[in-house]
Image (cartoon, rainbow, N blue to C red):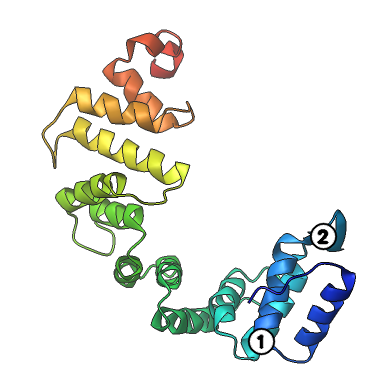
């Protein structure tokens, strides 16, 4: 639902509809408080996380499906309410049944924080989108038998597919692939390929681990400038 808001009167009408118990409208109001609402240079609602939480809770209590996962996130963080991990996990399960892969990943994180790594891995896998996390689980043997071959495949295939990766994820994937080519355990050892992926990981010069490995294997155009890091 996306109600057109052209002026202050429209915003007041939306707020009234929310007060009247319309769950979809209540969730819409919550999103406005998430980012703030400005029309024609006039601020109708400032971003306010406390009000966002309160309207999200009301939307959930009104039975709005969109609010379930968002409310679970808020209960999990406990930033603007009493932290309730048990209810958050219950709501994540409801959201998973409704088809949310993000909820599956969030539930995996909850199990990770409880040190139940097998269940964490199960929900990472169910999420289907956290291939970096899955690869790391296989690489280190967390929640699943250690398998560097599967880890390498996860890392490589994630980079190859048309996926929306954050800069952090892309750098970490390149770093892990470069590191594995350097180790030569699950894939044939290649300093050339290791250097290629480590350079991609450190393209912005902000990945210290990749930078250190590049220094060790001899990145000539940078080793002199950073010799103190290698000594």
Packing grade of label 2 (10 A; few <14, some 14-19, many >=20) is few
Q: Nearer the viewer, residue 142 or 29?
A: 29
Q: Is residue 14 left or right of residue 28?
A: right
Q: Secondary structure at mark 1?
A: helix
Asked if residue 180 is positioned above or below residue 198 in the image, the reply reads below
Q: Position of residue 28 (x, y in %)?
A: 68, 75
Asked if residue 191 is positioned above or below residue 63 in the image, the reply reads above
Asked if residue 88 is positioned above or below residue 120 in the image, the reply reads below
Specify the quadrant of the image occupied by residue 50.
Answer: bottom right
Q: What residue do we see at 48% from left, 84% from top?
A: 90
Q: Secondary structure at mark 2?
A: strand
Q: Position of residue 180 (x, y in %)?
A: 22, 37
Find the distance from the CA under tag 2 to the CA under tag 1.
Answer: 24 Å
Q: Is residue 93 left or right of residue 132?
A: right
Asked if residue 211 is positioned above or below residue 171 in the image, the reply reads above
Residue holding disc 1: 23
Which sits earlier in the primary sequence, circle 2 or circle 1?
1
Q: Nearer the viewer, residue 11 or 32?
A: 11
Specify the quadrant of the image occupied by residue 51.
Answer: bottom right
Q: Position of residue 173 (x, y in %)?
A: 33, 42
Residue holding disc 2: 39
Q: Nearer the viewer, residue 160 or 49?
A: 160
- Residue 57 seen by the camera: no
| Quadrant of the frame with the C terminus | top left
Q: Position of residue 104 (x, y in %)?
A: 40, 72
Q: What residue do we see at 29% from left, 71% from top?
A: 122
Packing grade of label 1 (10 A; few <14, some 14-19, many >=20) is many
Q: What residue do we see at 30% from left, 66% from top?
A: 125
- Residue 6 seen by the camera: yes
Foreground disc of the pair 2, 1: 2
């Amino acid at each position: 639902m996306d109600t057109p808001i052209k002026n202050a009167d429209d915003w007041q009408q939306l707020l009234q509809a929310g007060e009247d118990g319309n769950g979809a409208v209540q969730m819409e109001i919550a999103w406005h408080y998430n980012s703030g609402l400005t029309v024609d240079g006039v601020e109708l609602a400032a971003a306010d996380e406390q009000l966002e939480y309160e309207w999200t809770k009301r939307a959930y209590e009104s039975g709005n499906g969109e609010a379930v996962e968002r409310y679970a996130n808020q209960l999990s963080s406990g930033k603007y309410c009493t932290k309730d991990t048990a209810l958050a996990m219950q709501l994540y399960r409801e959201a998973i049944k409704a088809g949310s892969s993000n909820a599956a990943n969030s539930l995996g994180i909850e199990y990770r924080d409880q040190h139940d790594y097998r269940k964490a891995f199960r929900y990472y896998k169910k999420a289907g989108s956290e291939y970096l996390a899955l690869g790391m689980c296989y690489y280190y043997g967390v929640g699943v038998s250690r398998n560097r071959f599967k880890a390498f495949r996860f890392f490589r295939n994630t980079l190859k597919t048309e996926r929306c990766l954050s800069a952090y994820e892309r750098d970490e994937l390149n770093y892990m692939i470069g590191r594995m080519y350097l180790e030569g355990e699950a894939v044939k050892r290649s300093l050339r390929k290791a250097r290629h992926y480590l350079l991609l990981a450190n393209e912005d010069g902000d990945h210290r681990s990749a930078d250190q490995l590049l220094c060790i294997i001899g990145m000539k155009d940078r080793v002199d400038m950073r010799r103190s890091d290698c000594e």
